[in-house]
């Protein structure tokens, strides 16, 4: 027994030591956070890119395609577009651009007024002129003869030169070649930069890729965007180390890559290529055909500003496609809408420039870390383990030291196996532990100032000594709270606490909320210190466990409130298991389930907000510059403030403390969006706290006014009855 008591004493003493270690971990993480803050300021230029193949397709529906194409290039330059993307060419894209004409076997026979040959199904090509023959014949022969071993021979029709490719047209159309040289020439002559799009379809040849990148370098190309589900060189990496060779060539010519955000599936090999090119990567946001045509100027502008400011986007890729408009009776396109959205005085280009994002070549972040950061991250790791151990000890005191020691040993072993997994696991553990500890601290303080520590959570309604009756207590007795929560308590438990004045409860509420918020925010520097890597800023890696962070602190706070804060855990558990299930309970659980599912569905990047909420978000963004989180300032923070204030007098209000956990975890969750600049996350949290406190104070004042009015009304009613 003495050994057990001594072990308990050691664990209680260890808690103070662990809080010190957690604070040391926070302090050690500050230089790392400062390094990230500096890194995020090294890339501020944004690049506006239009898909040149879309422009060619739109021009194909015009009466004078060549004249239209030239005119639109001038309009795009005036609107702020600086770059044109060019895909690898195929025979059909060359035909659309007017470089050549294609025929299948039957069409070629009809053209030559000859019977369709039996036993063959070839592709026939006629060039538009001598220049086209000189440019495209070598490309076609190289792709089909050299790479695919498909015979290609000369052919002509009425003085027009061409080729016969001995493969069906459907097969020939699938073969990718280098970008159209004449289109590249036209684009550069018009004063645009180039963004080549490369696929992994063309068989990899180090010499030819070297020659191609050398030409791109001469043309001023600084970045490449990949087409398809993989980067160049992935397919033959195992055979000829093509991905390694491609990375060497990109580094040789100083050419980086662009990573498209929000792809359903990341492009294969991108992470490896980014690592091998020293993370010469920028993030790209794509505006779809439908959005380019259907969204209004202010929506596009807001989207681009939010992307640049909140998500480190430095390239905007604009798509456009022709569409049949039956109402107007013609083929329409989104170009005019894009020109207005970009080039107006309050359009995207000017708005982003005013916000500090000037148009120009997109540049990668300048990122480096000194070697001594490894020691700081080790200290941050110990800080995270300390928070986790403190949380475990809050539920079972005897586990505090054991969890801390196991955390040290387990983290060391996991670091050797996979350091990234270890860092992510500890970051998640710290992010969950801090807000949970904050709410546990509030619950304990509320107990200490009301029923005393380690008392029952609920029970039968018991009158206080106030014979005149308390108006609010009477109102609460008639509410569903008693029926819903009364079964948790032992007989005779008080539901209304006397002794604390409203002014005293108000000052205590502000103090508790401030301390709890500081405890929750302890996790932020530690998460930043553990996950301070350029891969997170570029979303090549992400914080893992968003849904766990969204739900675990709320669940832990609820479990602590109903099981661990009110006497014996086993007694509380037996009381809960012995509850009589009523329709009210079933309805409450069903409502909580629906609310919980909706809450989790809105967590992370996959949630979809309704239209009115999007409009409200836009208003907040315009008003404050950085949008505070709605669930924090409009819901969770005010309810936590009101909950603390009421909990110091009414037991039923303790459930609001659990709801208020949402705001505390949300503050930490804001900083787990590691691709968002730190100044944005910090501003967002501070705005949420400021507005949340303001709204919370209004709720408290409204409650006090309502409570006073109810008390007076009941007093008059009682006087009338006894009068």
Image: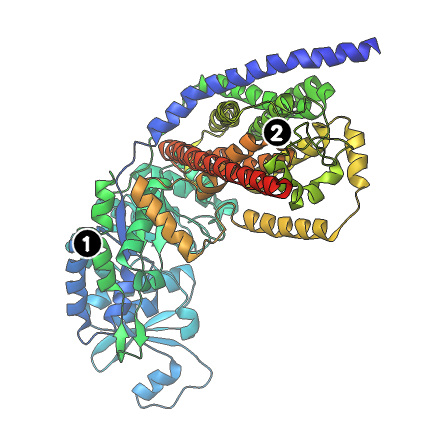
Q: Tell me if I can see residue 225 in this picture.
A: no
Foreground pick, 655 / 685: 655
* The N terminus lies in quadrant: top right
Q: Earlier in the sequence, mark 1 or mark 2?
A: 1
Residue 500: horizontal and vertical position, in percent?
A: 57, 23
Question: Residue 414 in the image: x percent, y percent?
Answer: 62, 27
**Which numbered mark, 1 or 2, is in the foreground of this view?**
1
Q: Which mark is residue 417?
A: 2
Left or right? Give the position of 324 relative to 23: left
Where, by quadrant of the figure, is residue 568 drawn? top right
Residue 509 in the image, given as x and y percentages of width and height: 51, 26
Give whichever of 567, 38 is nearer the camera.
567
User: What is the residue that sits farthest to the front in this orientation?
Assistant: 723
Q: Quadrant of residue 210?
A: top left
Q: Residues within 10 Å of mark 2 (few under 14, many from 20)?
A: few
| Left or right: 68 in relation to 588 | left
Residue 458 - label: none
Colour scheme shown: rainbow
Q: Is residue 393 above or below residue 244?
A: above
Which quadrant would the C terminus be assigned to in this image?
top right
Dot 1 corresponds to which residue? 343
Residue at x 29% of width, y 35% of height: 43
Residue 679 vs 347, above or below: the answer is above
- The residue under the point 26% across, 78% down is 328
- Judged from the image, the secondary structure of the residue bearing numbered disc 1 is helix
In the image: residue 41, left or right of residue 472: left
**Whether label 1 touches label 2, CB < 8 Å:** no
Mark pair 1, 2: CA separation: 52 Å
- Res 33 seen here: yes
Q: Nearer the viewer, residue 602 or 267?
A: 602
Percent of width and height locating residue 598: 56, 51
* 425 up-or-down from 339: above or below: above
């Amino acid at each position: 027994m003495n050994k057990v008591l001594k072990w308990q004493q050691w664990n209680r003493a260890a808690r103070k030591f662990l809080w010190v270690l957690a604070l040391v971990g926070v302090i050690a993480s500050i230089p790392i956070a400062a390094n990230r803050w500096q890194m995020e300021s090294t890339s501020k230029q944004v690049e506006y890119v239009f898909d040149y193949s879309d422009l060619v397709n739109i021009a194909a529906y015009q009466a004078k395609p060549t004249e239209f194409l030239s005119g639109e290039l001038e309009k795009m330059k005036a609107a702020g577009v600086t770059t044109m993307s060019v895909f690898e060419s195929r025979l059909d894209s060359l035909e659309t651009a007017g470089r050549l004409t294609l025929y299948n076997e039957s069409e070629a026979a009809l053209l030559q007024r000859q019977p369709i040959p039996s036993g063959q199904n070839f592709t026939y090509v006629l060039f538009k002129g001598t220049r086209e023959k000189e440019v495209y014949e070598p490309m076609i022969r190289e792709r089909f003869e050299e790479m695919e071993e498909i015979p290609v021979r000369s052919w002509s029709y009425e003085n027009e030169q061409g080729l016969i490719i001995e493969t069906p047209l459907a097969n020939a159309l699938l073969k990718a070649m280098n970008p159209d040289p004449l289109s590249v020439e036209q684009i550069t002559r018009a004063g645009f930069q180039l963004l080549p799009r490369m696929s992994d379809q063309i068989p990899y040849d180090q010499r030819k890729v070297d020659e191609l990148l050398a030409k791109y370098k001469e043309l001023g190309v600084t970045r490449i965007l990949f087409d398809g589900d993989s980067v160049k060189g992935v397919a033959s990496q195992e055979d000829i180390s093509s991905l390694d060779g491609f990375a060497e060539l990109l580094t040789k010519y100083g050419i980086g890559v662009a990573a498209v955000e929000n792809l359903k599936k990341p492009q294969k090999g991108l992470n490896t290529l980014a690592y091998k090119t020293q993370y010469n990567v920028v993030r790209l946001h794509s505006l779809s055909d439908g959005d380019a045509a259907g969204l209004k100027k202010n929506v596009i502008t807001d989207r681009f500003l939010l992307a640049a400011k909140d998500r480190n986007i430095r390239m905007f890729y604009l798509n456009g496609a022709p569409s049949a408009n039956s109402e107007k009776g013609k083929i329409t396109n989104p170009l005019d809408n894009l020109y207005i959205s970009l080039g107006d005085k309050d359009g995207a280009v000017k708005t982003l420039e005013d916000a500090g994002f000037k148009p120009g070549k997109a540049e990668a972040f300048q990122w480096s870390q000194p070697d001594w950061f490894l020691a700081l991250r080790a200290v941050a790791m110990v800080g995270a383990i300390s928070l986790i151990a403190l949380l475990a000890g809050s539920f079972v005191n005897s586990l505090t030291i054991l969890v801390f020691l196991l955390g040290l040993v387990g983290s060391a072993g996991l670091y050797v196996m996979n350091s990234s997994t270890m860092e992510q696991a500890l970051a998640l553990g710290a992010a969950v532990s801090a807000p949970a500890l904050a709410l546990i601290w509030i619950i304990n303080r509320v107990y200490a100032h009301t029923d005393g520590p380690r008392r029952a959570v609920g029970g039968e309604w018991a009158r206080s000594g106030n014979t005149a009756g308390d108006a609010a207590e009477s109102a609460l007795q008639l509410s569903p709270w008693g029926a819903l929560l009364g079964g948790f308590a032992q007989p005779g438990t008080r539901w209304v606490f006397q002794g604390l004045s409203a002014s005293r409860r108000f000052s205590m509420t502000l103090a508790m909320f401030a301390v709890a918020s500081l405890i929750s925010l302890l996790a932020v520097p530690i998460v930043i210190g553990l996950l301070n890597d350029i891969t997170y800023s570029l979303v090549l890696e992400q914080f893992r466990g968003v849904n766990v962070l969204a739900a675990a602190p709320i669940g832990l706070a609820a479990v602590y409130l109903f099981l661990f804060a009110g006497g014996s855990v086993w007694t509380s558990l037996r009381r809960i298991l012995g509850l009589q299930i009523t329709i009210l309970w079933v309805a409450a659980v069903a409502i909580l389930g629906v609310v919980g599912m909706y809450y989790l569905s809105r967590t992370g990047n996959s949630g979809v907000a309704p239209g009115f909420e999007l409009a409200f978000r836009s208003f907040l963004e315009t008003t404050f510059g950085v949008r505070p989180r709605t669930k924090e300032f409009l819901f969770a923070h005010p309810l936590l403030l009101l909950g603390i204030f009421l909990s110091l007098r009414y037991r039923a209000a303790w459930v609001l403390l659990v709801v208020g956990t949402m705001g505390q975890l949300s503050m930490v969750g804001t900083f787990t969006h590691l691709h968002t600049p730190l100044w944005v996350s910090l501003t967002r949290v501070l705005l949420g706290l400021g507005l949340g406190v303001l709204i919370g104070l209004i709720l408290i004042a409204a409650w006090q006014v309502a409570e006073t009015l109810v008390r007076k009304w009941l007093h008059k009613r009682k006087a009338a009855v006894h009068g």
